[in-house]
Amino acid sequence: MSYKLSACLFASIALGFVWLPTPAAAAPRVVIVVGANAPAVEQLAATELAGQLQKLFGAQTTTQTALPADDAAAILIGSPQTSAAVDAALGKQWPKLSPQGHLVKSVQSQGRTALVLGGGSPVASLWAVHEFGYRCGIRHLLHGDFPPLEKPAFTVAGFDVVLEPRVERRGWSAFNGQAFGAEAWSVAEHTRLFTQLAKLKFTHVVLPATLTPVAALRVDGDTPGRKVFGGARQFENADRGEDFLPRIKAAAAAAGLVVQVGVMPGATEITPGPANASVLPQFNLETLAAQLQAVRTNPGAGFVARVIIPGDLNASAHFLSRAAFTEQLTAAQAVSDLVTPICGKEVDERLLKGFGIAAKAAALIAANDPAVAVPAARMTLRHLAAKAAPPAWLTEAKTLYAQAMNEMYRANTRARDGARPCILYHAKRFEFALHYLTSIELVGKAGFAGAEGNKEARTQALEQAVEAMYNALNALADVARDASDRGTIAILNEHAYRPLLQALEATAKP
């Protein structure tokens, strides 16, 4: 399978995405053909396709149940079972597709070239629509879609793509009982995420049987990063209630995802991020590739991606999406396929280097103190009990995050203007990690100084630790874009910043 990529660019404001307009003079006329009794998911596919065509080409689109009578371009959605037009155009040549198999195929029908976007099931037809968009340069990430600036010429000719899954069940699970887990996401945020997961060809979303209550957290007064809460005094899920789980179940089903309650039987749990509920960016694309390769030995069982901070995982989600349909895709190639069209040349090299450095930091943390950034009542104050200087691994991990941050800022400089917020998120997340581990290191120094009876050194180290934690939370606030990011800021104020401030005040007393 080959990937035809165009150099491209997306425009963005803050962390939202804005499509660039196409001149009206170049706008093609396109008729989208769906079955007279098309399933709801195929009707959704038609709506999605109309949006893609308008955004990519400024196309004038109409939707009907038969081929156009005039010379408008025709794109057919569905299968011979759901669309008479697809049956007439491709029925005799329809390949043997599994329920997840899908195609993007140019055909001759009624003396004209048309394009068929279809699959072995209605949801597979939806995937075919997004595969067409992908091959036209659109990139689907967890927070939105990224269009190419240098858009391809519109055509319905020359497509001959048939895809079958190498991993049949691809699940997503993000409920973890913490304030930064999916418990904190509003129904609207879940709906947006489910839409993107469907575009990325995930098949399942795993929801808990019962919802673990997450206590409201104070974010008023002296709260570093307070700007992300819009003046609210507490961080909480305003949608939380008895109807919360039913509403997000309905949203997942409407997006074409299978809702699995509790666990997904037989599926292998994989960890695109940290294995525990750490708030530090910890991911390793090479390790993820190895996990997926192990899953391929039993493709019917599939995987569940256990997710902590979704914002870290766009490259991971893209890799899982594409590698689930091909045997040959490497992690490095997946990053290049994702980044080059939306950021420009050479940016992927910096990102890969930064991700690799961050993976080394994650390995150090996993080997020495996996709980160093897992929210708990004494997550920072426990380091005040140190009887020795901070360990070398902690300093090394901090240094690695600094290097990873620098690579992201270099990538940000190389990227075209519109692409920068996407890369800036990673740069700020690594900056957050640098300041966070600096704070932990300083708390350890304060503890050691106290054990040595040096109150002045203890006070000074605690002052610096408070400042470093303040800087960490403000760095994350600069790019916070969902409830997981906001929840991280809120819970670290509760369990890290304010306890450190209290410890400093107690130490400074005569």
Image (spheres, rainbow, N blue to C red):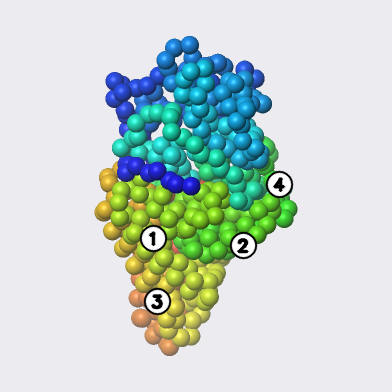
- Indicate the secondary structure of the residue bearing disc 1: helix
Judging by the rendered image, the residue that carries numbered circle 1 is 352
Q: Where is residue 315 in the image (x, y as percent from the top left)?
A: 45, 53
- Indicate the secondary structure of the residue bearing disc 3: helix
Which mark sits nearer the N-terminus, 3 or 2?
2
Q: Do the residues labelled 2 and 4 touch (CB within 8 Å)?
A: no
Q: Left of 510 or right of it: where is 118? A: right
Q: Where is residue 294 in the image (x, y as percent from the top left)?
A: 61, 62
Name the image quarter holding residue 393.
Answer: bottom left
| C-alpha separation, residue under disc 1 versus residue under disc 3 | 23 Å
The amino acid sitting under disc 2 is Ala
Quadrant for the C terminus, please: bottom left
Q: Where is residue 200 in the image (x, y as percent from the top left)?
A: 53, 43
Instruction: Please state which of the two labelled residues, at mark 1 or mark 4, is closer to the viewer.
Output: 1
Q: Left of 77 or right of it: where is 351? A: left
Question: What mark, if any, has residue 395 been given in the picture?
Answer: 3
292, 47: nearer the viewer: 292
**Residue at 30% across, 51% down:** 345
The amino acid sitting under disc 4 is Val
The amino acid sitting under disc 1 is Leu
Q: Report the number of numbered marks.
A: 4
Which mark sits nearer the N-terminus, 3 or 4?
4
Q: Are marks 3 and 4 in contact (CB under 8 Å)?
A: no
Which mark sits nearer the N-terminus, 1 or 4?
4
Judging by the rendered image, the residue that carries numbered circle 2 is 294
